[in-house]
Amino acid sequence: MLEGHLSRVVSINLISALIISLVGCYFLKTINLTSVMHIANLFGLSFLVIYGINILVESGDIKNGSQRFLLATALILIFDLIFLIIVPFFFGDVLSVTDSFVLAFSGIRINLNFNVYVYLAIYAILMLIVNLFLYLKDRQKYSNG
């Protein structure tokens, strides 16, 4: 019974996060900001990790420990894969933008080329760090009684 409830809540959270990301993509496309369409991924990821996983921890469906991080990692990977498939289908080839940064340190020039995959990895790492902060807050709350 618990697995059915858990899968239902995870599915609802995943679909809600995808809707939030697609609305963000639509908004960015309407104001002609297709070069930063990957930011809509951050909207969905933040909803999925901050809100969705916190609900599961507070309801007791998953434990505030390794299960929290395993579920967060799995959901981020699934969400990113679905995002990379759905966004080009609905909005065209908007995820093929590459950004170039030049850093100069002591006469050494470093050229950084960021594509969408680098940004998605950065967003995933940020969401895991946020998940760590939420874990520490919940651990402190539940240990004090």
Image: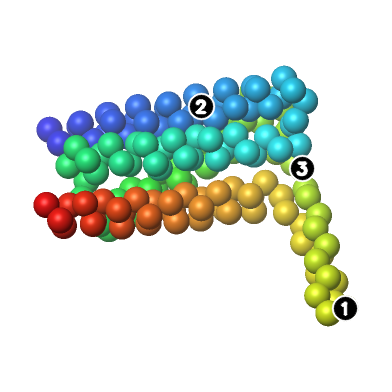
Which one is earlier in the sequence, the residue at label 2 or at label 1?
A: 2
Residues at marks 2 and 1, CA–CA distance in whole angstroms: 44 Å
Q: Nearer the viewer, mark 1 or mark 3?
A: 1
Res 67 seen here:
no
Percent position of residue 139, x then y: 23, 56
Relative image position of residue 94 (x, y in whole percent): 73, 33
Numbered disc 3: secondary structure: loop
In the rendered image, the residue lying farthest to the front is 144
Residue 107: mark: 1
Could you say whether the residue bearing mark 1 is in a helix, strand or loop?
Answer: loop
Residue 29 found in image quarter: top right
Residue 102 falls left or right of residue 27: right
Report the disc number at residue 81. none
Relative to 118, 109 lies left or right: right
**Amino acid type indicated by mark 1:** Gly
Quick check: 105 above or below 114? Answer: below
Query: Which residue is nearer to you in this view: 144 or 75?
Result: 144
What residue appears at the point 53 percent right and 35 percent down from the top-left corner?
43
Residue 62 seen in the current view = yes
Please give the residue where the numbered disc 2 appears in the rendered image: 20
Q: Which residue is mark 3?
A: 97
Camera-side mark, 2 or 3: 2
Furthest-right residue in this view? 107
Give amino acid for label 3.
Answer: Val
Q: Earlier in the sequence, mark 1 or mark 3?
A: 3
